[in-house]
Image (tube, rainbow, N blue to C red):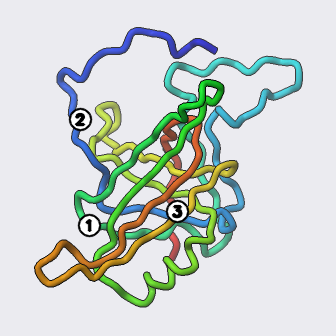
């Protein structure tokens, strides 16, 4: 299980732009018929046989697709530019190896549909996807972070403020929280809700 031990090169000649794209995709687990997992949650094929060690870097990847019930998919929320941030923090208990994954974003303005989403969405178990701002040099795609999983779904909370006329901004400061053993990258298909 120590395949991850190797030499790591630096950032020389590579982009490292901070932040995430100004959109987020969110879906309730109840809309999914199949939730794709990383190899962390994939048991050995047969009891008694040790799992085959995947290549270095593959344990945090989801390469399968999340499959949805007919007519369902991820909803897309456009967010205010430069407000999205993701943080993963390891739990500090010596005997605990997991961590918390937190994604924050700002949704501008106010409207009845989003008010309703926040009112009832806070009780949903969801998976959220956020796109990085750097393309991968090997394929030109933007990496996608996943917050939440089948075992440890994310939940959304929000605060709303009108601010004042000369103040900051009017809208919702939203947070997604989930337990996660590490940073999860989603490489599957992103099916959108019609």
Q: Give the residue at x 51% y 34%.
A: 90
Q: Is residue 26 above or below residue 112?
A: above
**Which one is earlier in the sequence, the residue at label 1 or at label 3?**
1
Dot 1: what SS?
loop
Q: Judge left or right: residue 47 versus residue 19.
A: right
Tell me which corner region of the image, top left, top right, bottom left or bottom right, holds residue 109: bottom left
Q: Residues within 10 Å of mark 2 (few under 14, many from 20)?
A: few
Q: Give the residue at x 32% y 56%.
A: 84
- Front one among 53 and 28: 28
* Cβ atoms under marks 2 and 3 closer than 8 Å: no
Q: Residues within 10 Å of mark 1 (few under 14, many from 20)?
A: some
Q: Which residue is mark 2?
A: 16
Q: Judge left or right: residue 66 versus residue 143.
A: right
Provide residue 85's location: percent of width, then percent of height.
Answer: 34, 51
Dot 2: what SS?
loop
Dot 3: what SS?
loop
Provide residue 47's location: percent of width, then percent of height.
Answer: 88, 25
Provide residue 51's location: percent of width, then percent of height.
Answer: 74, 21
The Cα atoms of the two marked residues, 1 and 3, are separated by 23 Å
Furthest residue toward bottom: 112
Q: Give the residue at x 37% y 51%.
A: 131
**Which one is earlier in the sequence, the residue at label 2 or at label 3?**
2
* Cβ atoms under marks 1 and 3 closer than 8 Å: no
Q: Residues within 10 Å of mark 3 (few under 14, many from 20)?
A: some
The Cα atoms of the two marked residues, 2 and 1, are separated by 21 Å
The Cα atoms of the two marked residues, 2 and 3, are separated by 28 Å
Q: Which residue is mark 1?
A: 80
**Which one is earlier in the sequence, the residue at label 2 or at label 1?**
2
Q: Which residue is mark 3?
A: 191
């Amino acid at each position: 299980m120590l395949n991850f031990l190797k030499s790591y090169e630096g950032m020389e000649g590579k982009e490292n732009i901070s932040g995430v794209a100004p959109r987020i995709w969110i879906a309730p687990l109840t809309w999914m018929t199949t939730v794709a997992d990383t190899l962390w949650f994939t048991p050995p094929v047969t009891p008694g046989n040790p799992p085959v060690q995947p290549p270095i870097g593959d344990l945090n990847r989801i390469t399968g697709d999340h499959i949805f019930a007919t007519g369902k998919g991820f909803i897309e929320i456009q967010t205010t530019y430069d407000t999205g941030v993701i943080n993963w923090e390891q739990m500090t208990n010596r005997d605990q190896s997991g961590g918390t994954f937190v994604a924050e974003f700002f949704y501008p303005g106010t409207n009845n549909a989003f008010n309703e989403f926040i009112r009832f969405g806070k009780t949903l178990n969801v998976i959220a996807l956020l796109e990085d701002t750097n393309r991968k040099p090997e394929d030109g795609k933007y990496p996608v972070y996943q917050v939440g999983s089948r075992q440890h779904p994310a939940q959304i909370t929000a605060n709303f403020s009108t601010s004042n006329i000369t103040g900051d901004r009017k809208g919702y400061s939203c947070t997604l929280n989930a337990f996660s053993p590490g940073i999860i990258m989603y490489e599957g298909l992103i099916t959108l809700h019609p």
